[in-house]
Every structure is written in structure tokens, then in C-alpha cells.
């Protein structure tokens, strides 16, 4: 065993990991573009963008340079009563590309905190106006994070089981389709006087299994919420910054949410940062001579200048024509591969949204069901590809700089896996 691994096992508790039975962690000593390099010199294609955060490739020289420059000028400053150039520039950058109804940017540390902030903004929006509205709507199979509020608006599952009795009540709706829209609308109408907000992952439910649904159906629900005076939160933590082929999943929609949450790709996947944006109307509901109407939320590292610098650098790369070409190229190749494997009897369902391609392995829900995930994970790892199936759902979510050759190599290994398993 390498020295690094034994020292890790002595000292570290890893996330989402059963430490008793898990395989030993693989030491990564270098990242470059789409590749990660192991301590023993193996090259791995990061086909899951390191938990969906990396959009421009690892150790991007431009982001590295901007981070280095910022570290020499100002590493951090308290963000209550003070501000700094990188935070202002990032807020302006974001407001220039997110839907026009968004007026203000609130910083936090990660996706879960971005969701916590959005929920607190909605709840207090109503209480500041002396209205008792505390019920929240979310979709079945949703995932919005691991802190308590974010966990509460996420689907109840094995991951939340130990805490279920402590999670606040949330009304879970089916994903919309052309057949159930009227039912969903009446569910919303029946609860409207109690409802504070409706939070959703637009177009793709990530952790729930890369479940996808139509923009036009979501449009109808958002429109209905507007009619019924229910606030809407688009959780774009995973879908933001190009993932769905457009800059934001909300760009596929005609109706825009009142609040939006961002993280993951926000810094290009370089370091943690969260953003919650909101409309002028929400912001205005907190303006008062009464100090009790203040949004009392903040983190020590709110708007960390280094994270904001990384994010501004990632923004520059995101806005280059070359990045847009990559999004189109990956989407097109995914689509072609989808059409090819769609008819394969081993594949129950293939779906694609921009740079995300997901396929469900067609296997009975036997004990084997639990093994297919590990089988596939290890198979691809052996082939030098990091793919981390969600149960029997295999998905590719690569950094946008992935080459056609590397995509073809991944598709080829999937073809082989489809023959083998
Ligand atoms: C990952 C994710 C989160 C949580 O973000 P963290 O940074 O892991 O806390 C929230 N919402 C969605 C849609 C996500 O995919």
C-alpha cells in the first residue's frame, strides 16, 4: 500500500463512503485538462468532472494564474460592511448572463448553502410581510444538498433515513409530463395559501438518477406558481454554466424562476463558492427601518476573493466562442451515441441533455442490481475512465475540453460493457 493511502486511512473519513467495506482511495497527484494522474503513474479520464464541478479541465493555467494573482493582493476580507473588486465584478458578470429578472447576488460557500439561503429568503419574504406561509414544494427524487434545509427539500431516501423525523414537511410532486399537468396544478392551487416556494432542478434531476423532463412542462408549472403567487427557485447548482448545452437550464425556459442557486461549475470547479440570486421584488421585501426584516445569514468566507477570482476567470473561459463550440460538439456526439445504443436490449432508457448522457442498465431488481454499479465502476476504472454510476444508471458528464478521441474511447468502452454485463 502506498504511504499516502495508509496515512489517509489512519486520519481521514471520506464522504459518501462506508469506511468498513470501501475500496482504498486512489491517490491523485496531478490533474491536467480532462485527465487525472494517480500516484503510480496511471492516467484517468475524469468523465464525471470530479462530482460535476469541473467544466474547463483540471489545473487550468488561466484560472491558476488569476488565483495566484489574487492571493498576492487580497486573500480574504469580511464581507459585512466591506466589499472588494472580485465580488463586484463577479456579481456583474453573473447578472449579465443569468435571466434578466434576476437583480441581486448573495454569496455563500457551496451548493447546499446556496439552497439554504434561497429557502430562507423565501420563508422570510413572506414573514416580513406578516404572511404565514411555511410549506415548500419540491419534486419527487429531487436532490438539493446535504445540510438540513437542503436535505429537507430533497427526496427522502437511504441517505436521509437517519434524519427523516427531524426534516421539515415538504410536499413532493411528480415530475411533470403532458398527462399530469392539470393534476399537479390543482395540487399547487389546493395548498397555495400555505406555500412559501417551489424548488426544482430545471430539466435534469442529477443525484436522483439524471432524470430528465421537458422545458415546456416546467414552464407551465412555473407560470401556474406565478398565478398562484408561489415563489419559485431554480436550483442550477448542477445544470448551470453550460451543462445542458445552453449557459443555464433556465435558458431553455420561457418562464423564469424568482430565485436561482449556483455552485459546482461556478468557479470552473476550482474551489468552493455558492451563489443565490433573486429578483428585485424579493430583495425589496427585506428593505425596512425595522432591523428584524434583515436577512440574517452569512458565512465566515462569504464572497472569498480568491474563489471570486477563480470564478471570474472561469467566466472568461466560459464566454469564449471555443467553449460554445465544445458544448455543441459534445452534445452532438452524445446524441449520435444515444441513437446508436437506444435499441440495445441491455439499455432500458437513454437520455441526453446537452453534455449529459445517461443510460439505464436493463437488469432485474435482484441482488445483482446492487452489484452492477460496482461492476461498471471497476470495469471503467480498469480502462482508465472515471464513471460513477448511480445504481444501474450510467452517465457521462465530462469537462467541456474533452476531445472527440477521448469521447470515442469512452463510447467504445461502454459498447464493450454492454456486451460483457
Ligand atoms: C450537488 C448539488 C447540490 C449541493 O451542492 P454541494 O456543493 O455539494 O453542497 C445542490 N443542488 C444540486 C442540484 C446539486 O446537484
Image (cartoon, helix red, strand yellow):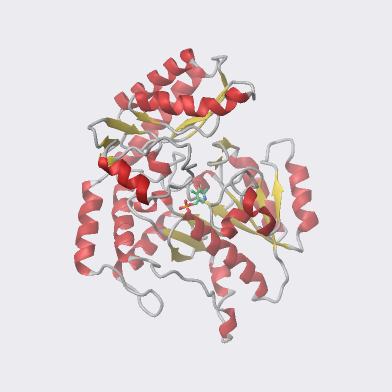
92 left or right of 103 in image: left
Location of the N terminus (image quadrant): top left
Position of residue 101 measured from the top left corner of the image (x, y, whole percent): 52, 60
Above or below: residue 234 compared with residue 48:
below
Could you tell me residue 330's position as x and y percent? 38, 31
Q: Total label count?
A: 0
Q: Is residue 44 left or right of residue 357?
A: left
Viewer-side residue, 284 vs 8: 8
Q: Is residue 167 left or right of residue 31?
A: right
Can residue 358 be seen from the camera position used here? Answer: no
Residue pushed farthest bottom?
289
Q: Position of residue 136 (x, y in %)?
A: 68, 58
Residue at (50%, 47%) from the top-left corner? 251
Say if residue 66 shows up in the picture: yes
Residue situated in front as seen by the camera: 275 or 320: 275
Q: Is residue 132 above or below residue 333?
A: below
Decide: is 197 above or below 22.
Answer: below
Which x, y percent locates residue 388? 45, 34
Q: Nearer the viewer, residue 347 or 385?
A: 385
User: Residue at left 26%, top 30%?
Assistant: 42
Amino acid at each position: 500500500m502506498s504511504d499516502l493511502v495508509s496515512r489517509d486511512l489512519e486520519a481521514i473519513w471520506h464522504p459518501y463512503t462506508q469506511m468498513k467495506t470501501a475500496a482504498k482511495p486512489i491517490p491523485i497527484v496531478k490533474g491536467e485538462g480532462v485527465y487525472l494522474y494517480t500516484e503510480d503513474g496511471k492516467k484517468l479520464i475524469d468523465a464525471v468532472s470530479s462530482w460535476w464541478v469541473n467544466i474547463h479541465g483540471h489545473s487550468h493555467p488561466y484560472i491558476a494564474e488569476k488565483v495566484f494573482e489574487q492571493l498576492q493582493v487580497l486573500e480574504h476580507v469580511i464581507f459585512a460592511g466591506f466589499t472588494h473588486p472580485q465580488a463586484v465584478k463577479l456579481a456583474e458578470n453573473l447578472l449579465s448572463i443569468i435571466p434578466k429578472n434576476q437583480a441581486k447576488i448573495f454569496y455563500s460557500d457551496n451548493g447546499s448553502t446556496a439552497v439554504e439561503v434561497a429557502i430562507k429568503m423565501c420563508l422570510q419574504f413572506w414573514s416580513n410581510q406578516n404572511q404565514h406561509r411555511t410549506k415548500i414544494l419540491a419534486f419527487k427524487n429531487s436532490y438539493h444538498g446535504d445540510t438540513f434545509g437542503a436535505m429537507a427539500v430533497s427526496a427522502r431516501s437511504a441517505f436521509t433515513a437517519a434524519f427523516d423525523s427531524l426534516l421539515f414537511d415538504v410536499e413532493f410532486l411528480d415530475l411533470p409530463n403532458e398527462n399530469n399537468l392539470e393534476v399537479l396544478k390543482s395540487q399547487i392551487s389546493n395548498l397555495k395559501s400555505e406555500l412559501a416556494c417551489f424548488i426544482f432542478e430545471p430539466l435534469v434531476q442529477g443525484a436522483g438518477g439524471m432524470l430528465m423532463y421537458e422545458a415546456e412542462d416546467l414552464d407551465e408549472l412555473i407560470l401556474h406558481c406565478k398565478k398562484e403567487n408561489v415563489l419559485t427557485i431554480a436550483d442550477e447548482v448542477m445544470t448551470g454554466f453550460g451543462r445542458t448545452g445552453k449557459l443555464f437550464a433556465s435558458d431553455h425556459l420561457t418562464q423564469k424562476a424568482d430565485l436561482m442557486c449556483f455552485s459546482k461549475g461556478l468557479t470552473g470547479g476550482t474551489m468552493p463558492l455558492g451563489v443565490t440570486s433573486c429578483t428585485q421584488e424579493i430583495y425589496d421585501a427585506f428593505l425596512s427601518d425595522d432591523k428584524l426584516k434583515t436577512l440574517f445569514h452569512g458565512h465566515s468566507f462569504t464572497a472569498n476573493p480568491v474563489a471570486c477570482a477563480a470564478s471570474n476567470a472561469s467566466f472568461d473561459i466560459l464566454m469564449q466562442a471555443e467553449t460554445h463550440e465544445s458544448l455543441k460538439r459534445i452534445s452532438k456526439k452524445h446524441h449520435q451515441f444515444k441513437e446508436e445504443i437506444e435499441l440495445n436490449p441491455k439499455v432500458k432508457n437513454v437520455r441526453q441533455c446537452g453534455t449529459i448522457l445517461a443510460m439505464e442498465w436493463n437488469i432485474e431488481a435482484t441482488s445483482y442490481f446492487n452489484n452492477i454499479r460496482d461492476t461498471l465502476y471497476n470495469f471503467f476504472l480498469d480502462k482508465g475512465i472515471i464513471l460513477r454510476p448511480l445504481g444501474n444508471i450510467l452517465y457521462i458528464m465530462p469537462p467541456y475540453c474533452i476531445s472527440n478521441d477521448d469521447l470515442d474511447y469512452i463510447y467504445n468502452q461502454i459498447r464493450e460493457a454492454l456486451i460483457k454485463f
